Image (spheres, grey):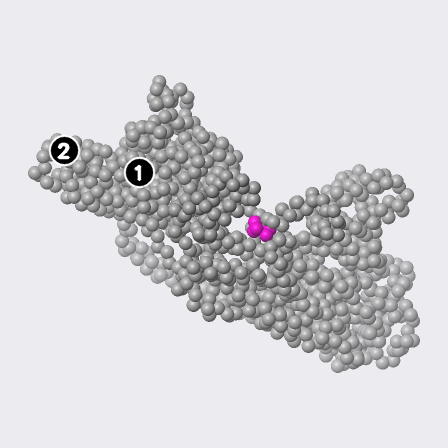
Amino acid sequence: MTAPMSQCLMQMVQTDYALSDYQSEIAPRWCAGCGDNAILTAMQRLCRDEQLPPEKTVCVSGIGCSSRLPHYMNAYGFHGVHGRALPIAEGVKIRRPDLHVFVTTGDGDCCSIGAAHWLHAIRYNMNMTVLLHDNQIYGLTKKQTSPTSPHGLKSNTTPHGAVLNPLNPLTVTLGVANVSFVAQAVDWIPDLLYETLSKAYHHKGLSFIRILQRCPEFMDHRFDDWVRDPSKMRILTHADGLRLKPEVSRIYKNQETHDPRDMGRALAISSLNDEIPVGILYRDPSVPCYDELRAGERPNTPALVQTVLNEEFDKVGIWPDPATAPEIRE
Amino acid sequence: MQHAKIADGLPSQPEREPSVAALRPALFAGYGALDDLRYDYPLVLIDGGSGENMFRPLSRIIDDILQETAAPDSSGEALRQQVLRLEAKIRRRVMQSGPCQLTDLWRDCAAEFIAQTGEAPFGPLDVNLDKARQSLYVDGLVIDCDDKTPGQVLVHTWKAMHQAKARVFRKKVDGLTLRLTDILKSDHMKSDEAHGAEALASSMGSSGDGSVDFHALSAVLARARPEDRLPQDRVERIQNVLRVLQSQLFYGPGRASKSGPKQPKPYSYTFESCASALDANRDRLRDVLDFTKALTVAELEVENKYRPELHDPIFERFDESDLTADQIGLLPSALVCLRDGETDATEIARAFEALACGLQITVLIQTDDILGATSPEPPRNSFGAGTTRIAAMAMGLNNGFVLQSSSAHLYRMRDNLVRGMQYDGPTLISIYSGATVTAPGVPAYILSAAATESRIFPAFTYDPSAGPDWAHRFDLSNNPQNTVDWPEHELEFEDVKGQRQSEKIAFTFADFAISDVRYGRFCHSLAQADWTPGMEPAADWLKLPPETNSNQKPYVFGIDSENRLRRTVVDDKIIEAARRCNDAWCRLQELAGINNSHALRLLAQDRLEREVAARAAENTQSTLSGPPSVAAQLAKVAEDAAPPVVTDVATDEQTEDTPWIETARCTTCNECTQINSELFAYDENMQAYVVNPDGGTYRQIVEAAESCQVSIIHPGQPRNPQEPNLVDLIERAKSFH
C-alpha cells in the first residue's frame, strides 16, 4: 500500500454525483432569458465534473438577483447581508479550509455596498472562487443605476441618463495588491464560461471572474451587438489560460494569445470599449494566501485557547500569596 | 611470517626513559595547546535548532557575529580581536568547568574579561562586546569534546526531532479532534436538549434579567428545528474515536498542558537498553493499534466517507501487519544509548534484533576504546573486539540507517545525523568518543580525529532511503583523502644539524597505536641520532605483500613530551593490526565505488578486448563495406503506405428540414423550455436540444427561435403542412436558417 491507508479506504467509497445532485428542490425563479441561469448551470457542471461532495461545497452570496443562486444549489449556502458575501466566505474558509467556497455577488452587491470588502478580499487572496454577476443594473429592485451601468443609462434613479462613467471591475481588481486571478466571461458563451470557472476553481488563491450577463427585463438588448457578432468578442487564449475547442474557435475567430502573467497587457485588454474580452486576464499562483499565512502551527482546540488565555490573564493577575500563584511561562 | 621480529631484545617498558612513555604521533605536534585553537569544539547544542543548525561550533557562531558586526577593514580590527579573545576565554571555561548555557558563559566571561583589563563598565571593550552580543541569535548548551559528547549530541538531536514530530502529530490529531467535535456539536444543536429552555437560558449567561421567556422561545424553536439528525451508530463511532484520540499517551499535550482533563504522563521513548525498548514496544502495541485505527476512522469521518458496510470488517481485522510506514512514522521513535564498557554485552544482540525487525528506534553505540586490550584482561562489560565494526556489520541488515563517526567529525556529519534521525526505520549510530583512558595526555578531540584519520574508525553513512543501490546509499566522503589508503600530511622538523626539514608522511594505524600506552611494548623509539638507513616508513612497509622478506624495519614518526622527533620502530603485532585495518578500509572504499575490484577487473577485461579488436581491425581493414540498411528502407515503405490521419471530424449536421439547436451555445435561460417543454428539453449539461420535433407547433418553434437570446434555435421546415399561417411563419423562420 503506497498511498496512506485512509486514502485507500476513501477510494472504496464510490461517489457518482450527477448534475441533478446539485440542483435544489427549488426551481430557479429568475426571469426567462436571464444570464444567471447559465452561470448556475456552469457551477453545477463544475461540481459534477469535479465530483465535489455537496456537503463540502458552500455558496455564499449577498443580496440581489445573482445572490439567489445558493438557493438553487444543493450544497451548503449562505444568503448573507447586502455587500457582505466576501467576509462571510472568508470566515467559512478560515475555519473550514476543507470546504470548497464559491461566492456569487452582483454588480451592486460587490462594487457598491460591498466595495470595501471586495478590495480586501482580493488582497487577502484566500482560496475561493468569486463570481461577479454583472448585468449593469439593479434588477431585483426593478431598474436602478448600478456602479457598472453605462454612461447615459436611463433608469428609475437616473431618468435623464447616468451622469457618471461606469466603474470597470476588472481594472479595479487588477490594481489591488496581491491580486492572483482575474478573468472575464459572458453568459452567452457557456463553453468558455465553464472553462473559465474550471480554471478559477483550480487556481489556488482568490479567483475573481466578472461575468457579463444579460438582463432581458431591464437591460434588454444591452449586449445584442456582441451576442450577434462573434467578431466583437475578443477571446484570450494561452497555454496557461483558455484553450478553445475547434467548434468554439470556428465561431469566435477574434482571438488573442495573452500570457496571464502579463499585467500590463491585462490592464490594456480590460480597458477595451468596443470589444468584450473573454478569458483569463491575469494569473499568478505564487501570491501568498492569507488563510495559509495565518494558519497556526496548531489548530485552536478549546484546551489550547484556554491555556493561552489563562497565560495572558496570569501575566496581569495579582496573587496575594506567592506560594499559590501559578508559574508564569513566557 | 618472514618479518624481522624486533620486539625481542628491546628494553622492556619500565626501563624506558620517561619522555618516551608519553610518546605521541608526530603529526599531533601542532595541536599541543587546544585551548588556543579554533576548531569544531566547543559545540553549541542550539535550543530549538533544526536541520543545519541543530548544533554549531562556537567558532562558527563567533564568525557569524563578526561577519555581521565587525567592519571588514581595519576599523573593525579592535572588535574582532576582542571577540576572538572572548571566544578563547569561553573555550577555556568550558574545558575547565564543563557544559554551560552559551548566554551565561558569554555574560560571565565578558565580565571577567572587562575586569581583567581594568576598564570601566561602558568602556570601549564593554561597548564592543555588547555590540557583538546583540548579534548572538542562538543559545544552547556549550559542550566540549569528552566521553559524554556522543550522548549529549544524540539526545539533543533526538529531542529536537521528537519535538518536531510532536508538532506534526498535534497538528494532525488536534485538527481531526476539532472537526469531529464540530460534527457532534452541530448534531447536538438539533437535539431537544440544545433547544430546551435551560440550555437557551445558560447560553445567555448568568446576567439574564428574566425579560426573556425561554420556555416560549424553546417552543418556537422546536417548530423550526431541522430533523436530519446523525445516525446513532455514527455518533457513537465518533465519540469512541474522540476518546481514543484525546487519551493518547504518545506525545504530551504540548502547550495546552495546563488545560483540559488531567492526563497520565505520556510514554517515555528514551531507554537504557534495547531489551526495555523491545518490551515497551510490545506493551504499547495495543495502544498503537487502537490509536491508528481511531486516526484512520477519524480521517474517513471528517470526509464523510466512512461506510460501515465497507469499512467495519477492515477495522475488525486490523492488526500490526496492517500498520503502514506513514502511520508508524507519526508516532515517536525510541532512543537507546549504549556504551561499550558499561552496557551489558548481550545488549548488542538485542540491538541487532531491534534493528532487524524494523522498529522505529535509534541505537547509539558509544565506544571509548577502539584498539582494545593487547592481552587478556579481567572480564568486563565489553562489546568485544568487533566493536569498531558494529556499524559495518549493521549495514548487512539492509533496512536500517547506519552512521559511524568519531566525535571530532560529528559537526561535519550533522546532515547525515539529522537524516538518520528522520529515517523512518531503525537507525544505528556508532560514535567513537576519543576519551580513551590508555592514551593519557591526548585530548579526546585529537584522539577521535586521529581515529578517523588513521582509518581505524572511518566516518560513513548507509542510508537505505537515499536510493536503490550502493552508489546512492553509501557515503564515505567525509573522510580525509578518501581515495588513498592512508592520508598524507606535511611534517616539518629540525634535524640534528638544526636544519629545517620537511617530509610528507602518511598517518597510519601504527601512528595511532603508538599513542596508546598499552601498545608501548610493541614499539621502540629512537632519537634522531640513532636513525639508520635500514628503516622504512610503516606506510611503505604496509604496501609490500605480507610474504615479502625484508630486512628493513617499519617505523612511524613520534614525538616525546618535549616535541622531539623520534622514529618509532613498530612490531609485527601492530603491523598485523594495521593490515587488518587497511583491509577493512579498502572494503569500505569498494562499497563507495573507490578502487572497486569488480569495476577494475571489468575495465581491464574491456581494455583487453578493445586491444584485441583493434588488432583484428588492423588486419582486416579493407574488407568491410556497409550493406544498405534494409530496416530503414522498410520503414520508409511503411510510412508511405500509411493512410493519412483524418483530422477533420465530420459533424453530424442536421438536415435543413428538422428543427435543431446549437446545444453547446445554450445559456440555460429557460426561454424555449417555457414555450414548450415537450419540444425543447435540457441535456445532462443543462443545455437545450430539440427533444421531439413533433412535440409542438411550428409557430412555437419559430417563436422560440425569435426569443432565444443567443439565436441558436434553427426552426427548419414545418412538419405539419396543415398548420395555419405557415407562409408567414416560414418567412419569419428564414433569418434563423
Residue B122 placement: quadrant = top right
Q: Quadrant of the N terminus of chain B?
A: bottom right
**Where does the image place residue B178, in percent across and percent down from the top left?**
52, 53
**Where does the image place residue A201, in percent across and percent down from the top left?**
42, 44
- Residue matched to label 1: A29
- Check if mark 2 and mark 1 are on a common chain: no
What secondary structure is marked by label 2?
Answer: helix
Give the residues in magenta: A300-304
Residue B643 in view, yes or no: yes
| Residue positioned 79% across, 80% down in the render | B378
Give the answer, above or below, for where B206 lies relative to B31: above
Kindly identify which chain the residue marked by label 2 belongs to: B
Q: Is residue A301 magenta?
A: yes
Dominant secondary structure, magenta: helix
Q: Amino acid at mark 1?
A: Arg
| Residue positioned 61% across, 64% down in the render | B333
Q: Amino acid at mark 2?
A: Leu
Q: Quadrant of the C terminus of chain B?
A: top left
- Residue matched to label 2: B729
| Residue positioned 81% across, 79% down in the render | B5
Q: Nearer the viewer, residue A70 or A216?
A: A70
For disc 1, the neighbor class at 10 Å (few under 14, some 14 to 19, many from 20) is: few
Work out how far the residue at label 2 is from the one at label 1, CA to CA, in angstroms. Answer: 31 Å
**Where does the image place residue B307, in percent across and percent down from the top left?**
41, 61
Q: Is residue B156 left or right of residue B307?
A: right
